[in-house]
Image (spheres, grey):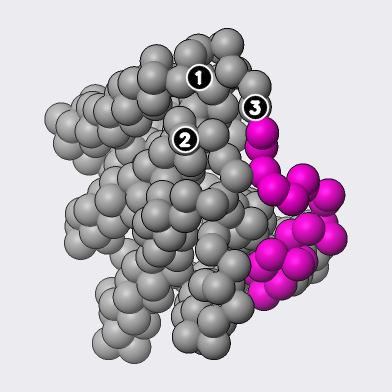
Amino acid sequence: MTTLALSAPRFTGFAQLRQDAPLFTTLGIAMALSLLPTLAAMQIDDRLFHGESIWVKPIKFQIALTIYLLTLAFYARWLPLAMRQARLFRIYCGIVAGAIIAEVLWIAGAAALGTASHFNDSSPVWAALYGFMGVAAVTLTSAVLVSGIAIWRNRASGLPDALRLAVALGLVLTFVLTVPVAYYMSSNTGHFVGTPADWDRGLPLMGWSRSVGDLRVAHFLATHALHGIPLAGLIAVLILPVQAARRAVVLASAGYAALVAATFVQALAGQPFL
């Protein structure tokens, strides 16, 4: 069994996040606070879109992007210090933040107008916006690829080797798995493969179809590789010798990628996840 040294310096809460990634931390907190007016709007505005409140999608994205931003801020402490302080990297972070803000405004704006944000080609304007937001989505997702590569190359991170590998693979695979799944899904007319049955109201909380294929399952799993694989790496480092922990991380990463691929193929076959 190995002794775990999680980081240097030790994590001290939001003060640490603000020190390591001030922009992403500030935007993550602002994104969380933006839930309050959206939740209020859902209570006041009873309009429905496809059987659910028009404000459900903005709320889901606000929650997801809050988690994403604070996760990036959490991992930022293991980026090389020179990289975090570099002007070019700060500009890049600003571009990522701008893409995130644009995504939220687009989705919330569509909700306020009572129309769809995704798969909306009802007019040339909405079709153009959908394409532009696809570029913004790839831009904001690229932050995990950049961070993953930088953390893997930073041998002075203070992380045990297997855990550094797990964090790096989790971040890189988030990009590698998410982009093709999201591209395929966005290039179609919707996330369903087939027509859901009348009784199908979706799985609780997630809303995934219980009667036809749903591409959102693979998309969800892909976007959370940055959580699942590092967690597996942390467990491996805590209970296994060094070399065995590295092998476990590689196997866990391969298994996670296989799970995303399996749920993607399952959806393409028109079969529900559950």
The residue identified by callout 2 is 161
Picture quadrant of residue 113: bottom right
Depth order, front residue of 44/66: 66
Per the model, the C-alpha gap separating discs 3 and 2 is 10 Å
Residue furthest to the left: 269
The residue identified by callout 1 is 236
Residue 206 at x, y percent in the picture = 52, 36
Depth order, front residue of 151/107: 151
The residue drawn where x is 83% and y is 49% is: 12
* Label ID, residue 4: 3
Which secondary structure lies at badge 3?
Answer: loop
Residue 44 at x, y percent in the picture = 79, 63
Q: Mark 3: few, some, or many residues within 10 Å (few <14, many ≥20)? A: few
Horizontal relation, residue 194 to residue 43: left or right? left
User: Is residue 41 something that shows in the picture?
Assistant: no
Q: Earlier in the sequence, mark 3 or mark 1?
A: 3
